[in-house]
Image: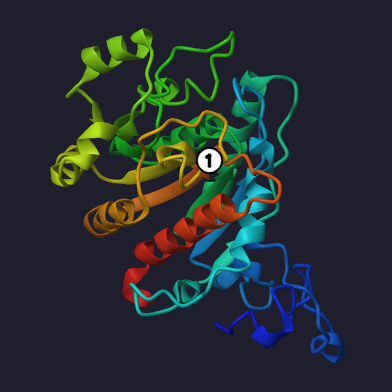
Amino acid sequence: MPNRRSDDSQGPDAGSEHPSHRPLPAALRGLPWELPHTFLGLDEESSPFEEARAVILPVPYEGTTSYGGGTRGGPRAILEASRYVELYDQELDGEPVSAGIHTLPAFELTRAGSTEAMAELEDAYGTLLDAIGPRFPVLLGGEHAVSAPAIRAHAARHSDRISVLQLDAHADLRDGYEGAPWSHASFAFRCLDVADFVQVGIRAVSAEEIAVVRERSGKGLTVVWADEMWEDDAWMDRALEALGNPVYLTVDVDYFDPSLVPSTGTPEPGGGDWYRTLRFLRRVFRERTVIGMDAVELAPTPGFHAPDFLVAKLIYKLIGYRFEEGV
């Protein structure tokens, strides 16, 4: 797998690849084209779909956000930031990009309403799963509503009940919010019939959601509250014990403390940190079969790139964990 940067001294927008997905004629390939606007800045020649083991799917949907907006810009910001992530990973002593990472065009969903959009996404995502076969899908949101159709599509294709590992500040267990049953605040509730949930980092819930937690605790729903995570690491064992196989991972970026990721619609103090989270997630990928993942709810702040970069690097780290044996 070639390095996407031919000359680091030329600056962050320099490189040997053309910004489009299509390979250039040989006579033009040496010109100083900018990096493509794909994950890690990889072009079609260095990351063809046929050879990729991971597939990036942007879904810039925003229809039910209830406080700060801007999640529609999340996928684009992640892709832009990822172009400046170093390909070598010191923890893994290798380049996860060697697994092959292909970026698809974005899904553009109907604007007829959230119910219609999520139905369209479930159908389209299912078609995608059938087409990509054993490749690892990584969905970039958009608001958290987009996770429900992805989870339901995965669940429909597995005979065993799947588990969802949800890193989040909010439980998202409302049976609808502000008149929308397929809201960002309801995605988990919409999937309880097809998947078990392990929720980590929760620190903001409604009375309605607490009732659901109490009713279902130990019966397909496990909650690790954020304050537990600061006592010791025992919560990691509890979460893993509750996690079945296979696993779908959904990361709402408001899981992180807002000192790390303030660029999100509903930030909550007291969230996860970087290294403790990576330690836990590496165990998850080693001890369970993770069949897909998403990262959602990034609402980019103009001129402030650190949160975008954190999410892009997290995704790259997780692809590395998924294919650790080949890095």
From this viewpoint, is residue 47 visible? yes
Side of 162 where 88 appears, left or right: right
Which residue sits at x=23%, y=17%? 216
Indicate the position of residue 312 as horizontal and vertical percent values.
54, 57
Quarter in which the N terminus is drawn: bottom right
Indicate the position of residue 237 as horizontal and vertical percent values.
14, 45
Indicate the position of residue 305 as horizontal and vertical percent values.
62, 54
From this viewpoint, is residue 243 visible? no
Side of 267 where 106 appears, left or right: right
Residue 48 drawn above or below residue 156 = below
Kindly state the secondary structure of the residue where label 1 is placed.
loop
Indicate the position of residue 240 as horizontal and vertical percent values.
19, 44
Q: Quadrant of residue 79?
A: bottom right
Residue 47 drawn above or below residue 231 = below
Q: Residue furthest front?
A: 259
Q: Nearer the viewer, residue 131 or 251?
A: 251
Q: Amino acid at mark 1?
A: Pro
Q: Which residue is mark 1?
A: 262
Q: Quadrant of residue 196?
A: top left
Quarter in which the C terminus is drawn: bottom left
Which residue sits at x=48%, y=41%? 253
